[in-house]
Image: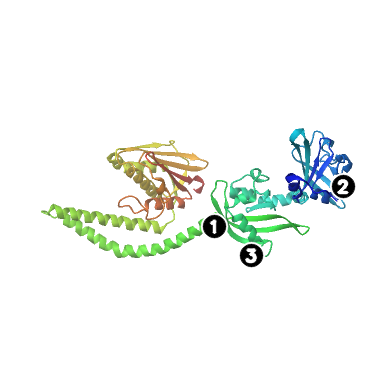
């Protein structure tokens, strides 16, 4: 019988069922072997205690096909921090990850702890994955969906290009370096693993079309549609493969469809309201103007009539903006000179610039590439943006428009030196009917973005309080 181990260290080694430990003294004689070691290698404690480790034979093969025993001196130099060895037993080949540690005790005593961990199943799975033929690899890499394969410990074995595009990583950043749970919000990976074993969701070991979120490299959350399956080998679970689809574009299209449906309904309402209100407004405004021109009218009454007339004009503009916002007429593109249009709008607003002590600057090449656009819609966008900049510079300043071609896009940057936009207002800039301006409708930027979108372009805004605002418009030249 094997003598029970003494001391906390020995009891700790005996408790390890997945690590086979052998302790050697300075003369490489066996002073201790844990229970797992004896059982796995079929040895008896009373037969090996005190014997040189060379007596245990050379059952292993190194990566260079060199026969290796249980003694670290048989390899020169001594084992590095981790070494892979193989051993044949019957019709099975075991793979071990081996570690050597030199232990210093009190009074100059020294030991060598030689430990082995059975990594056969993990190594076999990794080998099988590595041995996938080129067609399979190409199919995985060509998939637009994300594909991630991990072992049961969460180590990522496959991370295809689709996964990289969705999550923002390069495969070399992930494989062997990041655990799969890092790609999910807190506890989500655990919940998904539980669902894989739920028979109600495709069967045990199968998860079908589950909507959840993944974590992008930048920390943002990406909505995904996930399917997952357990991988088996010899009836043992050895890994999990996950297939997931990016739902961001789908969510955007759904939101766009909902927005279009709401706009269609709103458009019918606006058409009816405009019809019912516009004629009375014209009448009210006309009578107010006529009364305001009467001689000997008290000044107090004249001011009230002027106010009535101004409010009528404001309501008429609001109805006009609402009609433009809901109508969404497609652009009528014709090839034209965009720089000439910019100069025309600047000249149109020249008196407003001078009134606000704003200096306008246009920086562009003398000629721009041929470009087709709807001059009426782009004129409206420029007027809206110029007016916003003027309102942001009540004490005067500089308004600059830079025009250049970058990567087949015509890029316009409208830069003002105004008071800027507070961060808490940036999220709602393009939200309809949200405005911080007295008398504003909150539709100017929303209408401008809609018109630019109809040109297959995009509009973005960057701003800093007390430093000014930059509005960037990108229009693809190819859309012509």
Q: Looking at the image, do the residues carrying marks 2 and 1 touch, with CB atoms under 8 Å apart?
A: no
Q: Which mark is residue 201?
A: 3
Which is more N-terminal, label 2 or label 3? 2
Find residue 357 and report its image quarter. Answer: top left
Give the image location of residue 344, x and y in percent: 35, 43
Can I make out residue 293 in this image?
no
Q: Residue at x 34, y 54 (%)?
A: 441
Identify the residue position indicated by label 2 in the image: 46
Give the image location of residue 26, x and y in percent: 81, 35
Q: Which mark is residue 250?
A: 1
> Badge 2: few (under 14), some or many (20 or more) residues near its Cα, within 10 Å?
few
- What is the C-alpha distance between the residues marked 3 and 2? 54 Å
Tag 1 secondary structure = helix
Q: Nearer the viewer, mark 2 or mark 1?
A: 2
- What is the C-alpha distance between the residues marked 2 and 1? 69 Å
Q: Residue at x 77, y 35 (%)?
A: 109
Q: Which one is nearer the viewer's eye here, 67 or 325? A: 67
The colour scheme is: rainbow
Give the image location of residue 139, x and y in percent: 69, 52
- What is the C-alpha distance between the residues marked 3 and 1? 23 Å
94 relative to 83, above or below: below
Find residue 276 and report its image quarter. Answer: bottom left
Q: Looking at the image, do the residues carrying marks 3 and 2 touch, with CB atoms under 8 Å apart?
A: no
Q: Which one is nearer the viewer's eye here, 182 or 280? A: 182
Q: In the image, 203: left or right of 356?
A: right
Which is more N-terminal, label 1 or label 2? 2
Can I make out residue 343 in this image?
yes
Tag 3 secondary structure = loop
């Amino acid at each position: 019988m094997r003598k029970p181990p003494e001391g906390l260290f020995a009891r700790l080694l005996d408790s390890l069922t997945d690590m086979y430990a052998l302790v050697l003294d300075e003369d490489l004689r066996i002073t201790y072997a844990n229970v797992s070691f004896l059982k796995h290698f079929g040895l008896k404690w009373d037969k090996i205690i005190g014997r040189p480790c060379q007596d245990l034979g050379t059952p292993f093969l190194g990566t260079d096909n060199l026969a290796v025993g249980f003694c670290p001196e048989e390899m020169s130099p001594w084992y590095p921090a981790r070494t892979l060895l193989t051993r044949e037993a019957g019709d099975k080949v075991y793979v071990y990850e081996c570690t050597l540690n030199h232990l210093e005790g009190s009074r100059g005593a020294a030991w060598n702890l030689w430990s082995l961990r059975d990594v056969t199943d993990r190594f076999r799975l990794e080998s099988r994955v590595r041995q996938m033929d080129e067609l399979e690899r190409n199919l995985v890499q060509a998939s637009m969906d994300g594909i991630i394969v991990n072992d049961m410990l969460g180590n990522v074995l496959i991370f295809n290009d689709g996964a990289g595009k969705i999550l923002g990583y390069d495969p070399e950043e992930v494989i062997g370096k990041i655990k799969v749970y890092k790609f999910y919000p807190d506890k989500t990976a655990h919940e998904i693993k539980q669902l894989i074993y739920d028979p109600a969701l495709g069967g045990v070991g199968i998860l079908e079309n589950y909507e959840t979120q993944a974590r992008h490299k930048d920390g943002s959350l990406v909505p995904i549609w996930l399917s997952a399956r357990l991988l088996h080998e010899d009836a043992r679970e050895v890994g999990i493969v996950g297939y997931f689809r990016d739902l961001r574009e789908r969510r955007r299209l759904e939101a766009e469809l909902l927005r279009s449906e709401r706009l269609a309904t709103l458009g019918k309402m606006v058409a009816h309201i405009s019809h019912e209100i516009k004629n009375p407004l014209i009448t009210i405004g006309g009578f107010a103007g006529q009364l305001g021109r009467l001689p000997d009218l008290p000044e107090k009454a004249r001011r009230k009539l002027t106010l009535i007339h101004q409010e009528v004009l404001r309501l008429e503009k609001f109805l006009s903006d609402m009609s433009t916002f809901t109508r969404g007429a497609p652009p009528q593109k014709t090839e034209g000179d965009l720089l000439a249009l910019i100069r025309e709008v600047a000249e149109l607003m020249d008196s407003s610039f001078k009134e606000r002590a704003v200096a306008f600057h246009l920086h562009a090449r003398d000629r721009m590439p041929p470009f087709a656009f709807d001059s009426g819609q782009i004129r409206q966008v420029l007027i809206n943006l110029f007016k916003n900049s003027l309102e942001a510079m009540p004490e005067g300043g500089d308004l600059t428009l830079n025009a250049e071609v970058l990567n087949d896009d015509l890029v316009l940057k409208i830069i003002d030196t105004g008071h800027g936009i507070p961060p808490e207002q940036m999220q709602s800039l393009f939200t309809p009917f949200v405005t911080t301006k007295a008398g504003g409708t909150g539709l100017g930027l929303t209408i401008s973005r809609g018109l630019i979108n109809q040109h297959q372009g995009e509009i973005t805004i960057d701003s800093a309080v007390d430093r000014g605002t930059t509005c960037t418009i990108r229009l693809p030249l190819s859309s012509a």
